[in-house]
Amino acid sequence: MAANDTIADMLTRIRNSNLARHPKTEVPATKMTRAIARVLKEEGFITDFEEVGEGVKKNLVIALKYKGKNRQPTVRKLKRVSKPGLRVYSNRQELPRVLGGIGIAIISTSKGIMTDREARRQGIGGEVLCYVW
């Protein structure tokens, strides 16, 4: 799997681990996956994440979050929006609202990776990476 979509890969791994109710999942560590994990943690979708491994072969271990006695995953849905084949950008007026503000859109802006709410607050647009709710 060379030159793949690291973000889609990360979302798929989180999705699959959630379905299997795994406590943790591992994704290759890149600047992008690190930034997305940070946003997911700040927004309370995951418990925590840490980097493991040496040099180039670093991975992020993401601790998934479940709620209730049935252990429902906190992340109900992860949707990739902008893909390598079809990039999706939006300016600050057109930033998407996910489920009327219940979910978040993760946006890649000139000031880094942030939620749609944060980008709106700073008055900047960017590439819409994914929706999470």
Image: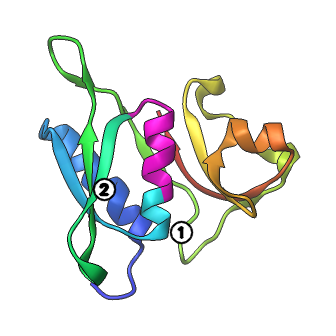
At 60% from the left and 43% from the top, the residue drawn is 105
Quadrant in which residue 81 is drawn: bottom right
Quadrant in which residue 72 is drawn: top left
At 15% from the left and 11% from the top, the residue drawn is 69
Secondary element under disc 2, as helix, strand or loop, is helix
Specify start and end residues of the magenta stretch as a single range: 35-45
Identify whether 82 is placed above or below 1: above
Q: Quadrant of the N terminus?
A: bottom left
Which mark, residue 12? 2
Q: CA–CA distance between discs 2 and 1? A: 14 Å
**Residue 5: x, y in percent?**
42, 73
* Residue 96 visible in the picture: no
Identify whether 44 is placed above or below 63: above
Secondary element under disc 1, as helix, strand or loop, is loop
Q: Earlier in the sequence, mark 2 or mark 1?
A: 2
- Most common secondary structure along the magenta stretch: helix
**Residue 123: x, y in percent?**
87, 45
Label 1 near label 2: C-beta < 8 Å? no
Identify whether 1 is placed above or below 83: below
Left/right placement of residue 93 relative to residue 13 reads: right
Crowd tier of the residue under label 1, counting other residues whose Cα lies within 10 Å: few below 14, some 14–19, many 20 or above: some
Tell me how the rendering is colored: rainbow
**Disc 1: which residue:** 83
At 44% from the left and 59% from the top, the residue drawn is 34
